[in-house]
Amino acid sequence: MGVAGCGKSAVGRLVADQLGLPLIEGDDFHPPGNILKMQQGIPLTDEDRADWLRQLGAELARHPGGVVLTCSALKAGYRDSLREAAHGLKFVHLAISQAESLRRVGQRADHFYPPSLVASQFEALQDPSAEPGVLTLEGDAPLEVLAQRAAAWLSDAVARS
C-alpha cells in the first residue's frame, strides 16, 4: 500500500513471486468512471472508492490460501474495509516523499494516473504505522530489498499465526 509511484506494483510482483502467491493488481479493478476521473485530474472520493474496495475485499476472500494485493489503501477506513474481508490481513506500506512520488509518477508514460493528483494522495494518506499488522518500509530502497524485507516479514507473520 501507499501513494502513487511508491512501487506497489513492482514490489508486489516480486513479493508474490517470492512467496509463491497470486498477485492482484488493484488498479485493474477500478471501474471506467474512476479511471476517467483520474485521467482528468479529479481525485476520487470515498464514494468513488467504496465499490472498488468491496470488489478488492471479495478478491481477497476468494484466496483463503493467501494473495498479494497492490492497493493504495490510503485511509484507515479503507484498510479496515479490506481487513473485514480477509481476517489477519497484513499491510506493507511503501513510504516515499511527495517529491519522490511526483518524480516517479511524472516518469510513467503508460499509466492513467497523472502527476497533478499526487498532492491529493498525500492529503488523503493516514499513516498506518501505529495500526496492527503493518510494516512500513522506506520506498526509496531498491525494489529487490523492499521485496525481500516484505516477504520475510510476511512469512514470519504467517508462521506466528
Image (cartoon, rainbow, N blue to C red):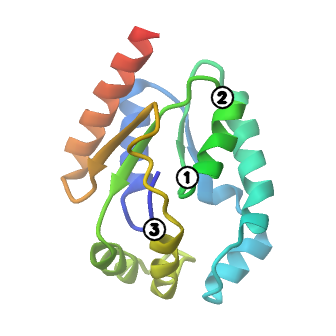
Q: Please give the label number shown on residue 86.
A: 2
Residue under label 3: 4
- Residue 159's x, y, as percent? 39, 10
As drawn, is 107 to the left or to the right of 83? left
Say what amino acid the circle numbered 2 marks. Answer: Ala
Residue under label 1: 71
Disc 2 residue crowd, few under 14, some 14–19, many 20+, Cα 10 Å: some
Task: Give the residue displayed 33% in from the left and 45% down from the top.
Answer: 136
Q: Please give the label number shown on residue 14.
A: none
In this rendered view, identify the residue nearer to me: 6 or 19. Answer: 6
Say how many tags the image has. 3
Tell me whether circle 2 and circle 3 mark residues in contact (CB < 8 Å): no
Q: In this view, does 122 lie above or below 129?
A: below
Q: In this view, does 126 lie above or below 55?
A: below
Say what amino acid the circle numbered 1 marks. Answer: Cys
Residue at the extreme top of the image, as rendered: 160
In this rendered view, identify the residue nearer to me: 24 or 75. Answer: 75
In this rendered view, identify the residue nearer to me: 132 or 54. Answer: 132
Disc 1 residue crowd, few under 14, some 14–19, many 20+, Cα 10 Å: many
Tell me whether circle 3 and circle 1 mark residues in contact (CB < 8 Å): no
Query: How far is disc 2 from disc 3 in space, using C-alphas?
Result: 24 Å
